[in-house]
Image: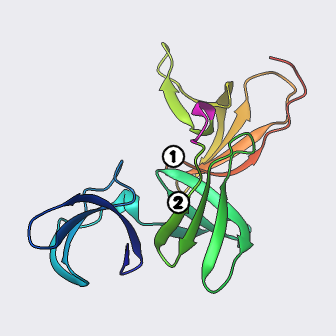
Amino acid sequence: MLYNGHRYYKNYEGKGDVVSWVCHNKHVCNHRVKTQGQYVVAILKDHSAECTVQYFTTGRGQIGAMFEGRRFHKNYQGKGDVVSWICHNKTCRRRIRTSGRHVVELSKTYHVDDCIAQFVTTSKGTTILLYNGRRYSKNYQNRGRVSWRCNKPGCMARISTLNDEILTTKNEHNHED
């Protein structure tokens, strides 16, 4: 069922033609709708923030999407206002399609574990960034934006973050590990 831009799966059928529906993002959203015939008779709980897509502008002026706590870049514009997005990590195959602020389709593949940046405090109290199995040290910081460089001397791989979210990556390493 599609209602107010959200897709729902049938949860169960009750008495008197009443059907309970659950948000298609049931792994992150507790939103429920009850229908009787073709009419919505009850709306239970609000959609969670993870259920809707947040849009942002990248440092290069491109539109990005945030969903499930992960960044996506635009893959292509579909029919009408449907947009296809792909995870920003090139090794990850997770895709979504959106219509406005709502996800209308999720790929069956899940994010790979290394498409999430992890901030770790070392035994010396220094914060490092772990991303795609590599370690990065803080290079400089300006107004919340942090530039990180690969820990290996001479490597030019860089990552830029803002409020612990990855903005850009120049992830070409000149070493094996």
| Image vertical order of residue 122 relative to residue 51, above or below | above
Q: How many marks?
A: 2
Q: From the viewer's perspective, tell me whether residue 130 is left or right of residue 157.
A: left
Q: Which residue is label 1 attached to?
A: 164
The spot of residue 59 in percent (x, y) is 69, 65
Q: Neighbour class for label 1 at 10 Å: few (<14), some, many (≥20)?
A: some
Task: Residue at 68%, 51% (x, y): give it.
Answer: 88
Magenta-colored segment: predominant secondary structure: loop
Task: Residue at 58%, 32% (x, y): give it.
Answer: 113
Foreground label between 2 and 1: 2
| Image vertical order of residue 137 relative to residue 141, above or below | above
The disc labelled 1 sits on which kind of residue?
A: Asp
Instruction: Please tell me which of labels 2 and 1 falls first in the chain.
Output: 2
Q: Which residue is label 2 attached to?
A: 66
Quarter of the image that includes the N terminus:
bottom left
Task: Residue at 51%, 79% (x, y): give it.
Answer: 100
Q: Is mark 1 on a helix, strand or loop?
A: loop
Considering every residue shown, the one lying at the far left of the view is 15
Considering every residue shown, the one lying at the far right of the view is 174
The CA distance from mark 2 to mark 1 is 13 Å
The disc labelled 2 sits on which kind of residue?
A: Met
Magenta range is: 110-114
Identify the image quadrant of residue 130. Answer: top right
Q: From the viewer's perspective, tell me whether residue 41 is left or right of residue 78.
A: left
| Image vertical order of residue 121 relative to residue 170, above or below | above
| Image vertical order of residue 1 relative to residue 137, above or below | below
